[in-house]
Every structure is written in structure tokens, then in C-alpha cells.
Amino acid sequence: MGKKINLIVKDEDKNLRVDVFINKKENEISRTRIKNLILNEKLKLNNEVIKDPSKKIITGDVLELIIPEPKKASLKPYKYKLDIAYEDEDLIVLNKPAGIVMHPGAGNFDNTIVNALINHDKKSLSNIGGELRPGIVHRIDKNTSGLVIIAKNNQVHEHLSIQFSKHSITRVYQLLIWGKVRPSKGRIETLITRSSKNRQMMEVSNTKGRKAITNYNTIEIFENKQTPTLSLLECKLETGRTHQIRVHMKYLGNNIVGDDKYKKKFKKIKNIDPLLEKKLISLNRQFLHAKTLGFIHPKKNQEMIFNSILPQELEIILKMLRNTSK
């Protein structure tokens, strides 16, 4: 049947956006979900269906929002060994390897983290994120590794979504970039929007898009005659836009090693250690790892922080760089 929410606008809330108003009154539902419900024609304003989340309201307006029953997932289980850092009755913290996508999409409906989660425990996954995304609160890219949270029920999913929307989740990534950044530590704040040239990519824009903030810090610089100049960075996210770190590094002119989408051509380096060169060329993923994940547990109301070590294929490259830098 679903759930019905009825609201009447009082004088103190006039001129608010309708999605902001509903979120203010129903703070257990994330604004993102409210916006999607409005776009899917689930809101009536004064008995008329509206599809504009930004519509302003006036005193006396009557709202009716329908929250339909979530669809049940009809996905195949996938026998895949999940690296679980933590699990309780409400959530899972997963350490995702590179090379696997988070959820089904065009061209791949069977071999994803979601399918592996269904194989792990089909009955315990939230289902408000859509039929193809049970449990998925946030994502990391296919060729990025590291920590992600999975919600086991809808209440926990909503609570975590609100933490993400408030940017209160701690997310720290490690990455290896070409060259070195100046200054060595800083804050990047831009708008990020979909690329006009390639719809699968994102880009920095001066005029449109969503605000994206990345704080970066240089941990180590590798610079000698036998290696190209490379830097190990840590990035702490304030926002979580699609491809955010990858786009911000390209914007600085310091692309991530192994990033096939946001790469730029580099000249062949003379005198480079051939084994190191082979490792850098054959890396079939970006050197980007979600190292730290921190959040407030929705039921226990405790701060939880998890750390993940670099995968072996990335650690080997760092060891080689350190050896040649001696």
C-alpha cells in the first residue's frame, strides 16, 4: 500500500522550496528521496500533481506525498567472496576490490556487489534505493577499491543518507598522481557537471553543476632519475560527487596513475626502471583507494571509524618507488 503524508503550510514556512519544506517536517526521509518522489509524480499540491521539487509554497497550501512500497529485487545471486570489515543486524562495511561495479546497470546485471550481497543474505538489504540497488547507500567507481557502507533495512538507509547529505561522513582516500601539486596541501572547491563531450565523464565548470569540495595533502613525493615524478596524496571529501577526486586531480593537472578516463599523455621517461615501468603501464585500475570511512551508527548512536590497507597491486608500486628513491 505504501505511506501517505499530509501537510499544511503555515505562515512560518511560506516561500520555502517544496522539497525543503517536506524534509523539514519529515526529517526521517532524506531530501534526495523526497526530490525523486516528486519527480516521479508522487506529490499533490492543492490536489494537483506537481513535478518540480524547487516550487515555492505559500501559506495554506495543502500537500499530499505518497511513499510507495519499495519494489522487491529480482536479481540473481552471485557467488563472490565479499571482504567484510564489519557486519551487524543493521549494516555492513565492505572492503570493495577494484574491477567490480557496485550495482547492476547497462551491460552487467549479474556480476556486481549487489548480486554478491544477495548471495550473502538476500533477506537483509534495504530496498528504498530502487530495484537494482538494494542496500546501496553510496558508491565507489568500478576501478576504485576501498570501504563502502551497505544498509540492511530502510530506516538505517535513510539515516545514513541524511549523514551523507549533511556531509558528516568521514571519507579519506589515498591516491598516486603524476607530478606534484603546489601548494602541497590545500582545498579544491569547484562546480562539477556532466561533460558536454562525453556523457560518461564529469568536468569542472565555472557556471553550472553541483558544488564539490576536496581537501588534499601530499604524503610522499617520488623524484629521481630512475622514476617519473609521482606523489602519494590523501584526499578528504567534504562532498561526494561522481568521479570527484579524479575530476579534481585532472583540474589541477595531476591525473591519477592508472586512470583510463581522465588520463593525459606522458612522454616516455628515460632511464626508468623497466620493472617499475611495466607495473605502471600494466595497472588496470586507477591508483585510488577509499582508505577511511567514519559515520554515526544509526541505531547505536556511536561513531564508527574503519580503515583499510592499500591492496597489494598498489602497495607493490609504492615499494618499488621507495626502493628506487633511496
Image (cartoon, helix red, strand yellow):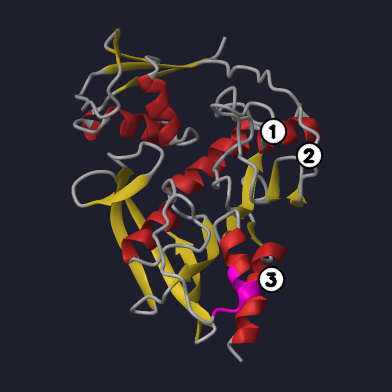
Left or right relative to 206: residue 249: right
| Residue 208 drawn above or below residue 258 | above
Q: Nearer the viewer, mark 2 or mark 3?
A: 3
Expressed as whole percent of the image width and height from the top left, the position of residue 143 reads: 58, 50
Mark 1 is surrounded, within 10 Å at the Cα level, by few (under 14), some (14 to 19) or many (20 or more) other residues, namely some
In the rendered image, which residue does mark 2 sit on?
80
Q: Quadrant of the N terminus?
A: top right
Q: Are marks 1 and 3 in contact (CB under 8 Å)?
A: no
Dot 3 amino acid type: Ile
Expressed as whole percent of the image width and height from the top left, the position of residue 225 reads: 50, 87
Dot 2 amino acid type: Tyr
Residue 316's tag is 3
In the rendered image, which residue does mark 1 sit on?
111
Mark pair 2, 1: CA separation: 9 Å
Left or right relative to 121: residue 177: left
**Does the stretch in magenta take in 275?**
yes
Left or right relative to 207: residue 302: right
> Which numbered disc flags the more N-terminal residue, 1 or 3?
1
Mark 3 is surrounded, within 10 Å at the Cα level, by few (under 14), some (14 to 19) or many (20 or more) other residues, namely some
> Which numbered disc flags the more N-terminal residue, 2 or 3?
2
Q: Nearer the viewer, mark 1 or mark 3?
A: 3
Instruction: Give the magenta range.
Output: 272-277
